[in-house]
Amino acid sequence: MAGLYIHIPFCKKACHYCNFHFSTNQKHKQDFIEALCKELQLRAKELSPVVFESVYFGGGTPSLLTTNDLNIIFQTIETYCQVSPNAEITLEANPDDFTEDKLIMLSETPINRLSIGIQSFFDEDLKLMNRAHSAKEAHKCIQLATPYFDNITIDLLYGMPQMTNTRWRENLQIAFDLGLNHLSSYALTVEPKTALEHFIKTDQHPPMDDAVAAAHFQILVDETAKAGFTHYEVCSFGKPGYFSKHNSSYWLGKPYLGLGPSAHSFEGKKRSWNISNNKKYINALANDNLPLTSEILTPENCFNEYLMTGLRTIWGVSLDRIEKEYGTAFQTQLLKNAQKHFDAKTLILDQNHLKTTQKGKFLCDGIASDLFML
């Protein structure tokens, strides 16, 4: 099992675009930590003799945890898990949670990678997103963190109608000037039941414009290449030695265990997910019950998931693997369905791997769904 994911379901405030599971009420944070440790204990039989190559604290906002909270979790992990000595251990964080003292204390834990939710280096964008930090804090937190952490990635959002191409280039240049070795960048999307969806429906915010997002994506690809980054996954850009081990394991189809409310697990042909409710999660584990649902994946499910993840990466989809795991019929149908994308120059065959072209990268999710086996 490649990765251990731990979902921390708390935030200071709700960002307008976010539909992840979280609560702004931290009253039961300690009860949650106890429940999380209990879940790890109850699922210990799933862990032996697994050696985890990565541990990822996601959310929510994991940087709301104190170092004492983190140490309790790490002690439980040490008791019930085997973690590789060279494991990548990531903490997602918001800029406003960092002081130098906290960074020093974090550097003394097993955490060796920070993923900071910058989103933009401009206050106007941050206010529209309802982020809790300012542009000044965005700059400062990276400057504070760099002496203590070599492996830092940030998130940046693009595609907002009010963001000009010039401002987007400036956002990227600031990241380059700060000496970062990795960044993840996403087009702002309108998710169901979010504040952003409501604002657009009530004409309080302009609708998303695909042409703006496409232009920003091309700028992103061009500028990161000039700055020495490898575009190794649609949303991910890293310099040599700084690709995300944890996220790469998802894209390469490796198994992972997810802990915490709403967290998903994957074991090759089986997927499970925890209930997306903090109170029910805590109460279930207080009674030694695992609050999860499972499903067995069909060959079509597994094939489609491999397409969806593989086409997002520079490694692509191996036709040899398709034939070995799913049979010649799947491979033949895949190539038949792919022909129109070869003709459109959005897909190519490279050393028996199906890959998106530069033209196809921005469209890869749609291309993958077009190739699905139904």
Image: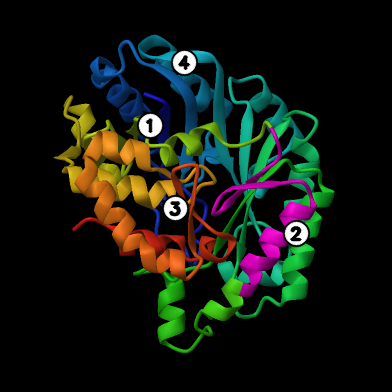
Badge 1: residue crowd in 10 Å (few <14, some 14–19, many ≥20): some
Residue 218 is covered by the magenta coloring: yes
Badge 3: residue crowd in 10 Å (few <14, some 14–19, many ≥20): few
The residue lying toward the viewer, choosing from 126 and 100, is 126
- Which amino acid, by three-letter code, is at mark 4? Val
| Cα–Cα gap, marks 3 and 2 | 36 Å
**Disc 4 to disc 3: CB gap under 8 Å:** no
| Residue to which mark 2 is pinned | 223
- Which amino acid, by three-letter code, is at mark 3? Thr
Residue 306: give its label: none
| Residue to which mark 3 is pinned | 24
Quadrant (top left/top right/bottom left/bottom right) for the N terminus: top left
| Cα–Cα gap, marks 4 and 3 | 31 Å
| Cα–Cα gap, marks 1 and 3 | 32 Å
The answer to whether residue 247 is above or below residue 35 is below
Q: Which residues are magenta?
A: 215-240
| Cα–Cα gap, marks 1 and 4 | 16 Å
